[in-house]
Image (cartoon, rainbow, N blue to C red):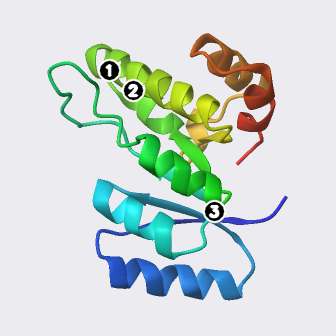
Amino acid sequence: MTQQIIIKESNFEKARKAIREVQKENKEIIFSSDDDELNRKILEKEKINILLINLAGKKDFQKQRDSGFNQVLAKIAKKGDVAIGINFDEIIESNQIEKSKILARIHQNIKLCNKNKLKMKFIIQNPKNQRNIYDLKSLGAVLGMPTWMTSACAEQT
């Protein structure tokens, strides 16, 4: 298992510089940002392994959820062989109302990833939120992941 580095940035130039530094060390790169435009720019221009999408605190539209992921990003991610990350800490640490919204957004992203044959992975940063592999696979199945995706999503990170 390769070592993983999570890069959280809000500025493209800083993010690019950080990604280039980590690429030299030959580690798996997980990129995360609250800015959807920056996520797209990084997907198009840089080589990352996982795009971690933060779902807490987003405002939904009237008839659609704002999941920070769409079919355009899915096609770019497919071309670059980038997996989509699910922030497990957000699920565990949010209140009940926010948790239901996060799970609905994840469900929407799972549908998009399944349609485009993209891998998804649970990213757990906080050690106290660590769960065993079967719990993660079960959650993935409940949220609508097909079998091929649940086996890939539960790799320990």
Amino acid tagged 2:
Arg
The residue that appears at 21% across and 28% down in the rendered structure is 60
Q: Which residue is mark 3?
A: 80
Does 102 appear above or below 3?
above
**Of circles 3 and 2, which is in front?**
3
| Residue found at the far left of this picture | 62
Q: Position of residue 87 (x, y in %)?
A: 49, 40
Whether pointer 1 and pointer 2 mark residues with C-beta atoms closer than 8 Å, the reply is: yes
Left or right, 129 with reference to 38: right
**Of circles 1 and 2, which is in front?**
2
Q: Position of residue 25 (x, y in %)?
A: 71, 84
Is residue 82 shown to the viewer in this render?
A: no
Q: Residues within 10 Å of mark 2 (few under 14, many from 20)?
A: many
The alpha-carbon separation of the residues under discs 3 and 2 comes to 23 Å
Does 11 appear above or below 40?
below
Q: Residues within 10 Å of mark 3 (few under 14, many from 20)?
A: some
Q: Position of residue 75 (x, y in %)?
A: 54, 50
Q: Position of residue 30 (x, y in %)?
A: 57, 61
Q: Quadrant of the N terminus?
A: bottom right
Amino acid tagged 1:
Lys
Q: Residues within 10 Å of mark 1 (few under 14, many from 20)?
A: many
Mark 3 and mark 1 lie on one chain; the one further toward the N terminus is 3
Does 11 appear above or below 106?
below
Q: Which residue is mark 1?
A: 101
Splitting the image into 4 quarters, where does residue 148 fall? top right
* Residue 105 image label: 2
